[in-house]
Image (tube, rainbow, N blue to C red):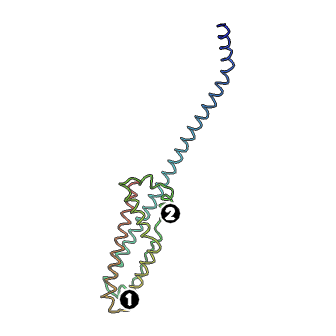
Amino acid sequence: MSGDIAFLSCEFWNEMMPSFFEGFGIVLGIVIGVLINILVNDRVNNSIKNKAKKALVFELNCNLVKIDEFLRELNNYEQKVISGHVEMSKYYGYFKFSDIFSATCIQLYQNGFFAEYLGSQDKMHVMSGLQNAINSLSVSSEQMINNSIESNRVSASKKSELWETETKPKAFNEIQFWRKKLTEGKKSFEDVVKIFN
């Protein structure tokens, strides 16, 4: 009887071994395929994230150059206001805030990219500052500053007595307001660039 069991056992293994190895090979192939898929996806995602970081840094560096131009033009405007109504009436500067790039920032915000990198409590102020900077340098802000400058220029060209008592102080207040907005925006962009460099 024990010889029959040993014989059955050998016969069983002889028949089952090819099936076992075939099944084991299939399972091993699936596991390896899944691992390769995970590694490839991870590599592709890292590549996409690196490209997104580079695009963001490029966009923000371009914005920093533009903000510096806006600050120079604001200083030019301030000098015209200081010079008086004759010089102010000749001022035709324009602040084109709509040239500020924000497409990459908006896209990365919507994709949750910022939440991954700026989600910690110590970096939340950076995200808030970035949102404020982009909102402050919008088309509506562009219209607001340029309409105000045009109004001040027209008032200066009329040589009215209101220039010294109302228009000039109002212009200085607006200059201070926009200088603050621009420098805050610049700092926000610089903070984000530091994080992603």
Sort mark 2 into few (<14), some (14-19) or many (20+) by Cα contacts within 10 Å.
Answer: few
**Where, quadrant-wise, is the N terminus in this rendering?**
top right
Above-or-below relation of 96 to 91: above
Query: Front-most of 26 and 40?
Result: 26
| Measured Cα–Cα span from mark 2 to mark 1 | 37 Å
Judge left or right: residue 7 versus residue 191. right
Q: Residue at x 45, y 52 (%)?
A: 116
State the image coordinates of residue 100 (x, y, percent, origin top left). Answer: 46, 68
The quadrant in which residue 123 appears is bottom left
| Residue 47 horizontal/vertical position (percent) | 51, 48
Question: Which of the two discs, 2 and 1, labels the residue nearer the N terminus?
Answer: 2
Decide if residue 95 is on the left or right side of residue 16: left
The residue where tag 2 is placed is 103
Q: Which mark is residue 118?
A: none
Disc 1 packing (10 Å; few <14; some 14–19; many ≥20):
many
- Position of residue 188 relative to residue 169, above or below, is above
Q: In front here: 152 or 120?
A: 120
Q: Is residue 179 left or right of residue 116?
A: left
Which residue type carries mark 1? Answer: Ser
Left or right of residue 88, residue 20 in this image: right
Query: What residue sits 38% from the left and 88% below the top?
Result: 155
Which residue sits at x=58%, y=34%?
31
Q: Which residue corresponds to the image point at 42% horizontal and 83% vertical from the top-left? A: 150
Residue assigned mark 1: 155
Name which residue type carries label 2: Ala
Image x and y of residue 106, in percent: 49, 62
